Amino acid sequence: GAVVSQHPSRVICKSGTSVKIECRSLDFQATTMFWYRQFPKQSLMLMATSNEGSKATYEQGVEKDKFLINHASLTLSTLTVTSAHPEDSSFYICSARDVSSPLHFGNGTRLTVT
Amino acid sequence: DAKTTQPPSMDCAEGRAANLPCNHSTISGNEYVYWYRQIHSQGPQYIIHGLKNNETNEMASLIITEDRKSSTLILPHATLRDTAVYYCIVRFSSNTGKLIFGQGTTLQVKP
């Protein structure tokens, strides 16, 4: 089945630094990938839709300059949290869809900003 | 996409069937019902989806009422590893593919 790989699984960074999270579709090409954020004891919140070769589409309330998304190839999308602050600490999850299958999710990245 | 309503939590005895309900009374004719689950600290896992007919796969069965206003996910023989948050999501098949998650049902399988 479709496999989505996310890296790193955990990252700790200092306040003010930037962190990059990678999302790869391992056995299929994904023209569209999605980025979610999840705070403790809450549901997943869609942040943005990442389109290969074009600009990402951000959901209302998500700062595009803070959460930079790049989808340079059909198998890779990256999310960069710029100038991270403690309130950005969260569980970030990417997902991708093969044209013939439902949406599949990576195993998430636990970001802790100190 | 139509809104869904699920009970916040349910318990089930190990080895018994777990029946998780979902209400989607505003569903439209070409919207699908999807079920995902999320085990603690992992990404969501696809379980099953359907449009009108009941569906079954190696993980679960999906029963959709005739008026399509509600559905039930059935885990036939729940195990401790089935303890997770289960999300019922309704979406069009032809949209961008994004899924909007509600609060889901926390299923606790007990020995």
Image (tube, rainbow, N blue to C red):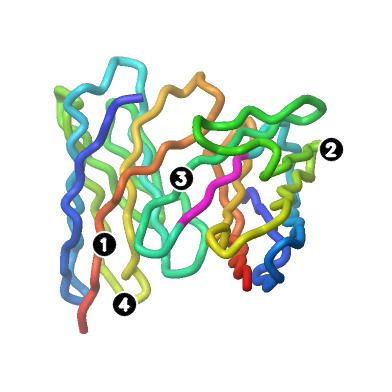
Q: Amino acid at mark 3?
A: Met
Could you give the CA–CA distance between mark 1 and mark 2, rounded to whole angstroms? 36 Å
* Left or right position of A67 against B4: right
A15, A42: nearer the viewer: A15
- Give the magenta range: A34-38
Marks 3 and 2: same chain?
Answer: yes
Q: Which residue is mark 1?
A: B106
- Secondary structure under tag 2 reads strand
Task: Tell me residue A94's x, y (percent).
Answer: 61, 49
Which residue occupies 50% across, 40% down?
A: A46
Tell us which disc is closer to us: 4 or 3.
3
Could you give the CA–CA distance between mark 4 and mark 2, rounded to whole angstroms? 39 Å
Task: Tell me residue A36's x, y (percent).
Answer: 54, 47
Q: Which residue is mark 2?
A: A73
- Secondary structure under tag 1 reads strand
Tell us which disc is closer to us: 4 or 2.
2
Which residue occupies 36% across, 28% down?
A: B32
Tell us which disc is closer to us: 3 or 2.
3
Could you give the CA–CA distance between mark 3 and mark 1, rounded to whole angstroms? 17 Å
Location of residue B29 (image quadrant): top left
Q: Amino acid at mark 2?
A: Ser
Residue reaching furthest right? Answer: A72
Q: Amino acid at mark 1?
A: Thr
Location of residue A17 (image quadrant): bottom right
Dominant secondary structure of the residues highlighted in magenta in the image:
strand
B34, B42: nearer the viewer: B42
Location of residue B106 (image quadrant): bottom left
Q: Chain of mark 3?
A: A
Which residue occupies 35% across, 38% down?
A: B89
